Structures are given as structure tokens and as C-alpha cells.
Image (cartoon, helix red, strand yellow):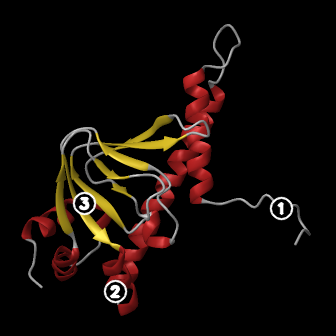
Amino acid sequence: MSVNRRAALLVREMPLFAELTPKEVVLLGMVLKERDYQPGEWLCREGEPGNGCFFIGEGEVEIIKRAANQSQAVIGRAGKHATVGQISLIDDGPRSASVRAKTRVEVLRLDRGDFEALQASGSQFAYRFQLAIARSAAAQLREANQTLMGLMEHRETPSGSMQRVTLQKVQAVLAHTRDLHPVSTKAEGEA
């Protein structure tokens, strides 16, 4: 397998991978796939099988969530050096949100099969890489929680009525957070 020099260069620039050795950066550059998306193109869609994640080298994407009424709301944005879709590396569930290019976007994609091969190697590199992915997912969950709290604190207009767009965003963030960290609805003691 040959080294994708552009991928290795982008990996070196990303704070997420700051602790990797030069040899590990080259290794990661060998498995990452480089791709460009134009504004409006979908990187992935909510509900599709999750089979990889994206590391953003350049540009900006929108994170979009379907609400209960099937309307869509932009619940976040991610830009240079961000990671999106990493939950799909951790579980076998469908995508919990859609990701669409807002600007021209350059990404590095890590497929689940390559991630699992790294994981199975049991090397220190695999451990550090998995930890970086987990930290990235945790940071996104914290951000979603903060966004939700901000929306809930500002839910009423001066006239006292709920703004429709804010309600849709709260529903979308709640659904996204629930997808990331499922909560049991059964009462304690139920089978």
C-alpha cells in the first residue's frame, strides 16, 4: 500500500493527531482516503449505515438532524480539523445525523474496516488513535449538551410564545443526543 502524501500532510496538521509519531502519521496516511465535496453535497445522511468517519482538512460542513415532524434543522457546523461521523466507528447503528458541505470541503475518510484492523493490531498506535476518536466524540457530545441548554434557556419570545424554529432545533438536538447516548424508557424493575 502506498503513502498518500497529501493525507499524511493533513494528518500532521490536525491537533487530534498531535501525539502520533512520524511513522504513525505515515501509517495513517496509507489508510485514509482523500475526497473533495462541493457546496451542497452530502458526506453522509441520517439513517444510512455508518461505515466510516471524516476528518475535515479544509472547508465547513453543516450537521443536520431530522425532527419528529420530518423537518430538518441545522444543529451544528464543523470546520477545519474537525471530525464528523466517528460514532459509526464505535457502534453498528445508522447515522444519527446528516452532514452536508457548506463550502468546498476537503476530507480524509477512515472506513470502518480500516479502523477495525487498526484496533485488532493491539499496538500503542491503535490505542492512541482510538483514544483520539473517543475524545473527539466526547467533545461533540458536550457541545450538543451546551447547545441544548442554550436553546432551552432562550425558548420563549418576549410575548411568551415558543419560537417554532427553536422548538425544532431543541427536538433535533435531543434526538441527536439520545442517538449518541441512549436512555432506557423502561421503569426500574421492568423486564
Q: Position of residue 90 (x, y in %)?
A: 48, 72
Give the residue pinned by disc 1. Answer: 186
Q: Is residue 118 above or below residue 102?
A: below
Mark before the other along the chain sequence, 1 or 3: 3
**Amino acid marked by disc 2:** Ala
Q: Residues within 10 Å of mark 2 (few under 14, many from 20)?
A: few
Tell me the CA gap for discs 3 and 2.
Answer: 22 Å
**Amino acid marked by disc 1:** Lys
Apparent side of residue 69 relative to residue 44 in the rendered image (left or right): right
User: For numbered disc 1, what is the local secondary structure?
Assistant: loop
Let me know if residue 122 appears in the view.
Answer: no
Q: Foreground residue, 89 or 127?
A: 89
Q: Residues within 10 Å of mark 3 (few under 14, many from 20)?
A: some
Let me know if residue 49 appears in the view.
Answer: yes
Tell me the CA gap for discs 2 and 1.
Answer: 37 Å
- For residue 25, what is the image quadrant? bottom left
User: For numbered disc 3, what is the local secondary structure?
Assistant: loop
Which numbered circle lies on residue 117?
2
Give the farthest residue toward the right.
Answer: 189
- For residue 116, what is the image quadrant? bottom left
Q: Which residue sits at x=50%, y=72%?
A: 92
Q: Marks 1 and 3: CB-CB under 8 Å?
A: no
